[in-house]
Amino acid sequence: MSLPAVLAQSSIKPRDRSVTGCPQNNDLCPGWIADNVDRYVDPFVRHVELTALALAFGFPIAFALAVLAYRRRWLVGPITATTGILYTLPSLAVFFLLQPVTGRGITTATIALTSYTLLILFRNIMLGLDNVPAEIKDAARGQGLSANQQLFRVELPLAAPEIFAGLRIAATTTVGLATLAFLAGAGGLGEPLFDGGDGIVFRGNVVFCGLLCVLLAALFDLVFLLVQRLASPWQRVGTA
């Protein structure tokens, strides 16, 4: 007996990877999504990669700019204006304008997504440093600490809550913007969400991709919260 005949008589049904039936009717289709969940694994992993790369490049750049502006206050305005312009550029336009220079792929998406993190991170780092009480700065100078020692031993640790808040906001924003990275050929969850190439765009697909984005944003938020608690043990002691 042939394999199709055996399957027809068996209670075990082959996985339906076609777009007919429930997806074709634009329904939620939880069963179809469960059977085809492997379609979303690679886009989800790429989405994590895009978000992590944007933060990994954006934070050092914003940190260096914030420390420079903290030491040279006249730079605050120009840096804020420049990063603000980058932040307000339409994401679709940035993805397409970069492609003639950097080509299609993850490089173009990373540059664009990194540029959108700079304003958020820069402003929160500056806010944290500016909120360090003046009497603590005076006490640090009175202990004979140099400017660099005061910055890294006193001011930055006390600015940690605002800095991590900026990282959490930047991560959430980047997760949302990264859904458009597929337009630059970088993949991500935007690919199964918007791509109609294989005909899987339907309500259930949109809802599931949206839930994955929300889950990813929540995971990044949780990770930064945990890192903040580990990096600020005095806050746990104060709370206790």
Image (cartoon, rainbow, N blue to C red):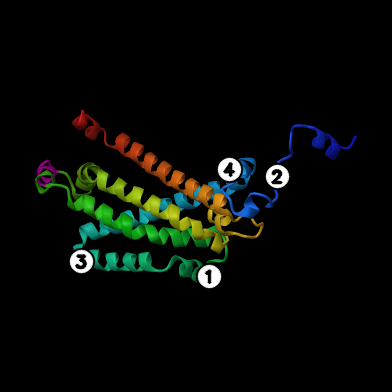
Q: Can I make out residue 149 in this image?
A: yes
Work out which quarter of the rendered image holds the C terminus and state it. Answer: top left
Q: Main secondary structure of the magenta part?
A: helix
Q: Position of residue 10 (x, y in %)?
A: 79, 32
Find disc 1 in the rendering and name its residue: 101
As drawn, 111 above or below 133: below
Please tell me whether residue 142 belongs to the stretch shown in magenta. Answer: yes
How far apart are the two marked residues, 1 and 2, measured between alpha carbons? 42 Å
- Residue at the far right in the pictured view: 1
Tell whether label 2 touches label 1 (CB within 8 Å). Answer: no
Q: Give whichever of discs 2 and 3 has the lower sequence position.
A: 2
Q: Quadrant of residue 157?
A: top left
Q: Give whichever of discs 1 and 2 has the lower sequence position.
A: 2
How far apart are the two marked residues, 4 and 3, measured between alpha carbons? 56 Å
Q: Give whichever of discs 1 and 3 has the lower sequence position.
A: 3
Write the residue at 24% across / 55% down.
Answer: 126
Task: State the residue in front, 183 or 105.
Answer: 183
Task: State the residue in front, 134 or 14.
Answer: 14
Find disc 2 in the rendering and name its residue: 16
